[in-house]
């Protein structure tokens, strides 16, 4: 019988690991600074992944808002209250915007925990 890894569903709760990731990353950033390397690997990776996660989050939130805008008139004409007006879309868009950052925090936590 083979053991398969259970795919973990990411959620915003992974953002709670950010202080631990900062604590594990700080010694690596100090080593980069002390080594006088022009571009420290860990520092460069930190900046790049934040920019990428921010961009992905922005597009995910915009996609949720566009989806709700496209459903607006069909919902109104069918007699339903539009999701765009009751605040659920804003919450979904915010959750979608945070998800890429939460995934990256989890990846960093897993990667930096294995270094020890």
Image: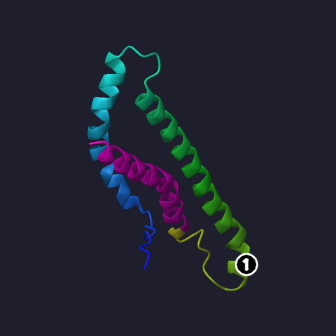
Quarter of the picture containing the C terminus is top left
Quarter of the picture containing the N terminus is bottom left
Q: Where residue 47 appears, x then y in whole percent? A: 47, 33
In the image: residue 91, left or right of residue 12 = right
Q: Residue at x 44, y 63 (%)?
A: 10
Would you place residue 50 above or below residue 76 in this image?
above
Instruction: Work out whether residue 70 or residue 21 is closer to the camera in this orientation and state it.
Output: 21
Question: Main SS of the magenta segment?
Answer: helix
Would you place residue 49 above or below residue 10 in this image?
above
Q: Residue at x 50, y 53 (%)?
A: 100
Would you place residue 30 above or below residue 1 in this image?
above
Q: Where residue 74 appears, x then y in whole percent? A: 73, 78
Q: Where residue 68 appears, x then y in whole percent? A: 64, 68
Q: Where residue 70 appears, x then y in whole percent? A: 72, 68
The image quarter containing residue 77 is bottom right
Instruction: Work out whether residue 74 or residue 47 is closer to the camera in this orientation and state it.
Output: 47
Count of marks overlaid on the render: 1
Highlighted range, magenta: 89-116
Magenta segment includes 42: no
- Number of other residues with Cα within 10 Å of mark 1, as a class: few under 14, some 14 to 19, many 20 or more: few
In the image: residue 72, left or right of residue 6 = right
In the image: residue 10, left or right of residue 82 = left
The image quarter containing residue 26 is top left
What SS does tag 1 mark? helix
Q: Residue at x 58, y 45 (%)?
A: 55
**Residue ID for mark 1:** 74
Magenta segment includes 104: yes
Task: Check the image and name the residue furthest to the top.
Answer: 36
Q: Residue at x 62, y 55 (%)?
A: 62
Task: Check the image and name the residue furthest to the bottom.
Answer: 79
Would you place residue 93 above or below residue 38 in this image?
below
Instruction: Work out whether residue 63 or residue 76 is closer to the camera in this orientation and state it.
Output: 63
């Amino acid at each position: 019988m083979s053991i398969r890894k259970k795919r973990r569903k990411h959620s915003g709760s992974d953002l709670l690991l950010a202080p631990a990731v900062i604590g594990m990353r700080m010694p690596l950033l100090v080593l980069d600074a002390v080594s006088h390397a022009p571009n420290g690997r860990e520092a460069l990776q930190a900046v790049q992944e934040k920019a990428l996660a921010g961009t992905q989050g922005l597009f995910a939130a915009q996609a949720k808002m566009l989806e709700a805008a496209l459903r607006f008139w069909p919902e109104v004409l069918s007699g339903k209250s539009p999701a765009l007006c009751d605040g659920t879309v804003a919450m979904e868009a915010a959750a979608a915007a945070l998800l890429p950052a939460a995934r990256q925090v989890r990846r960093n936590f897993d990667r930096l925990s294995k270094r020890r």
